[in-house]
Amino acid sequence: GNYGGKITINLGAQSEKEAKDTVLTDPTAAADVFAFADDQLNELVQAGALQEVQLNADDIKSRNTPASVDAATVDGKLYAYPLTADNGYFMFYDKSFFTEDDVKSLDTMMDKAAAAGKKVSMDVANGWYLYSFYAGAGLNLALADDGVNTVCNWNEAPGADVTQAVIDICKNPGFIALKDEEFTGKLKDGTLVAGVNGTWRANDAAEAWGDNYAACKLPTYTLNGEQVQMASFSGYKLIGVNPHSANVGAAMLLADFVTNEENEELRFKERAQGPSNTNALAAASSPALTAVVDQSEYANLQRVGGNFWASAETLGSICVNGNPDGKDTQTLVDDAVAGITAPVTQ
């Protein structure tokens, strides 16, 4: 459309993580166009803070990966423009230490690391990563139909055994449960030969390992003597348009432009952000992105209620610390699930 004149665009810095809080404080005063993490979609839609994408919805759907479109959709309606498709986690490793065959199995990796006095890292005391083991074993964690509470069956079989497997992994001398902010330091001092993390640590790994920097999908772990593929959360950044905008039409055009093939390619080149645009993704190549795409087959959208995080962190911490109170693993997951599924007080 022709808006007969100039459009002035004012840029404001805003973390995608906190976008929802800023917008929901006063949707009428919020930005016309804003970026946000896909797990905030439901709340923004419920609050009437996102303009449905209707005019060119088919075009948006056809040019982006199906998973990123899914991440921008509620009840079959598209509410945002996919921007990136790289917010998941995978395995970084030093390829002078591990072969491509080694990295298929977490046990093999830990045994080799232990023998050399080195470590493989994963932030187990964090629900985002702990999810990997339970979801890999086929257990369910999801947002309830009310969009607020959490459904979780980690205390059903084989949840207790998964918990024991995680405790055993954390006890392995070749393993260390580092927090994200500790990861880079342990990369640089030579402690780590591998670690589970996301694209935001790719540059650090590349710097530490140089030409030996490699990345791949997550390995399998041992559950009751069987090999189970580790799952993960996948995440997408989306661009939303505020329905309270004085210029919704122009705002939609801007959101469309920001997320087009050319701009997503540019964003990959300049900032190493993984495109959701199918063509841009095909053209973008990096070890981390290839690993994200390979892992995406075993990844699910993060759709959980607010009470998941603290209870999952408690369970993860108990595993990291070797179950210090010697509680029965069934009791551990029963307690965790009771906390995770507890009603969220509005």
Image (cartoon, rainbow, N blue to C red):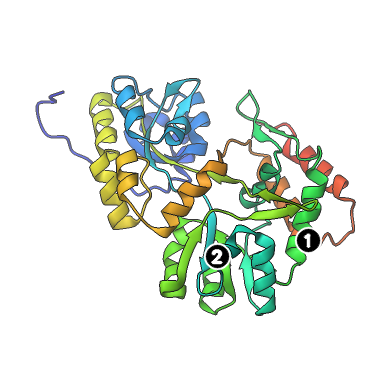
* Residue 10 appearing in the image: no
Residue 122 location (% of width, % of height): 62, 61
Identify which amino acid the numbered label 2 is placed on: Glu
Quadrant (top left/top right/bottom left/bottom right) for the C terminus: top right
Q: Position of residue 196 (x, y in %)?
A: 57, 59
For the residue pair 275 and 72, the one nearer the viewer reads as: 275
In this rendering, is residue 97 above or below 127?
below
> Mark 1 falls on what kind of element?
helix
State which quadrant residue 237 falls in.
Answer: top left
Image position, residue 321 (x, y; %): 78, 63
* Apparent side of residue 310 relative to residue 1 in the rendered image (left or right): right
Q: Position of residue 264 (x, y in %)?
A: 29, 45
Left or right: 281 with respect to 145? left
Residue 168, disc: 1
Q: Is residue 114 above or below residue 223?
A: below
Residue at 42% x, 31% y is: 69
Which residue position is annotated with label 2? Answer: 181
